[in-house]
Image (cartoon, rainbow, N blue to C red):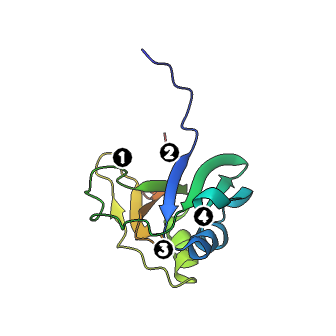
Amino acid sequence: MLKLNKIHHIAIICSDYEKSKDFYTQVLGFSITRETYRQERSSYKLDLSLHGNYSIELFSFPGPPPRVTGPEATGLRHLAFEVDDIESAIAALQEHDIQTERIRTDILTGKRFTFFSDPDGLPLELYEKTTWNGKWINSL
């Protein structure tokens, strides 16, 4: 069996580099590790980290095709981010005019979650670390 250590990174292709760069850094709070312009491809590669952990490669290419359909298309379904407090996270997104779906509860874990989209419609999820059952409890 192949022994994997961890997920190294997630690669995302965007249609508007500056708009997506702003979204992932200014709205979601990722830090830029390295930004490279690849002249031969007319393409940017932006390495992003969250709390010091390298996690997203944001690519731009001239004229990329749009996502085929919603989150049920073959391929990456969505990218989920853990948050401590889902209401606070939603409020922070709304400050940037980003709408979320209604808060739902995962029937398997009892955790609350919601979806929103990046500038290209990539489905993103907020998944709450703690849950309310009369008192706050830590996730298992």
Disc with the residue nearer the chain's start (1 vs 3): 1
What amino acid does circle 4 point to? Ser
Q: Find residue 119 and name its label.
A: 3
User: Going by the picture, which residue comes out furthest to the top?
Assistant: 1
Nearer the camera: disc 4 or disc 2: 4
User: Which SS class for mark 3?
Assistant: loop
Question: With respect to residue 28, does 108 lie above or below?
Answer: above
**Residue 84 in view of the camera:** no
Q: Residue shown at 53%/74% (left/top)?
A: 16
Disc with the residue nearer the chain's start (4 vs 2): 4
Mark 3: few/some/many CA within 10 Å (<14, 14-19, 20+): some
Q: Is residue 40 left or right of residue 115?
A: right
Q: Find residue 42 and name its label.
A: 4
What amino acid does circle 2 point to? Ser
User: Which SS class for mark 1?
Assistant: loop
Q: CA distance from mark 1 to mark 4?
A: 44 Å
Disc with the residue nearer the chain's start (3 vs 4): 4
Observer-nearest of 124 and 11:
11
Disc with the residue nearer the chain's start (2 vs 3): 3
Nearer the camera: disc 2 or disc 3: 3
Mark 2 and mark 3 residues within 8 Å of each other at the beta carbon: no
What amino acid does circle 3 point to? Pro
Disc with the residue nearer the chain's start (1 vs 4): 4
* Residue picked out by circle 1: 109
Observer-nearest of 97 and 43:
43
Mark 2 and mark 1 residues within 8 Å of each other at the beta carbon: yes
Mark 2: few/some/many CA within 10 Å (<14, 14-19, 20+): few
Question: With respect to residue 48, does 19 lie above or below?
Answer: below
